[in-house]
Image: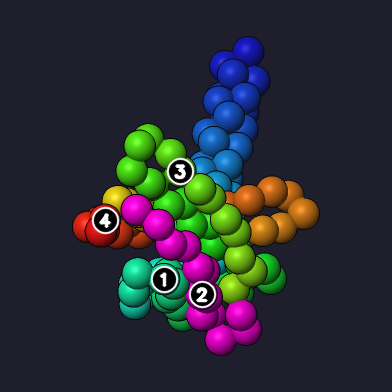
């Protein structure tokens, strides 16, 4: 009986450790990107989504830009990032605040890669 309990306990410990290692491998295999040079010039939001070396490359990356407008209104739009990682989205009006979120789009769903915010003085 003691041998059976020892074997079962060893099996539980083994599968627990294997599960932790598998979870760490899966997390390490996720693509990583950073939003850089995000800017709003009063007409266009521009920037670049830069890949982190040593991580997988995402097949499709989209940015979602949300413009928050005076009077408690907002407008959101998405854009598929170009091959070189750049994007440009137009938004004009009495804009106070802007969020930019980069997402990896796959058959399994959407994964957030990075986010930036811009505070704008509305004219």
Q: Secondary structure at mark 1?
A: loop
The C terminus sits in image quarter? bottom left
Which circle, 3 or 4, is nearer the viewer?
4
Q: Quickly name the residue at label 1.
A: 43
Q: Quickly name the residue at label 4.
A: 122
Q: CA distance from mark 3 to mark 2?
A: 18 Å
Residue 112 x, y percent position in the rendering: 51, 53
* Mark 3 or 4, nearer chain start: 3
**Quarter holding residue 71:** top left
- Please identify the residue farthest to the left as the structure is shown: 121
Determine whether 122 is above or below 15 in the image: below
Q: Are marks 3 and 1 in contact (CB under 8 Å)?
A: no
Q: Quickly name the residue at label 2.
A: 88
Q: Quickly name the residue at label 3.
A: 74
Q: CA distance from mark 1 to mark 2?
A: 10 Å
* Mark 1 or 4, nearer chain start: 1
* Mark 3 or 2, nearer chain start: 3
């Amino acid at each position: 009986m003691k041998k059976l309990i020892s074997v079962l306990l060893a099996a539980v410990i083994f599968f627990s450790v294997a599960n932790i290692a598998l979870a760490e491998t899966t997390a390490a295999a996720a693509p990583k990107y950073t939003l850089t040079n995000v800017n709003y010039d009063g007409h266009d939001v521009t920037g670049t989504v830069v890949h982190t070396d040593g991580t997988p490359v995402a097949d499709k990356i989209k940015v979602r830009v949300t413009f928050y407008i005076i009077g408690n209104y907002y407008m959101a739009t998405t854009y598929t990032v170009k091959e070189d990682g750049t994007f440009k989205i137009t938004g004009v009006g009495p804009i106070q605040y802007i969020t930019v979120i980069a997402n990896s789009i796959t058959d399994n769903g959407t994964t957030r890669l990075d986010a930036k915010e811009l505070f704008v003085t509305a004219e």
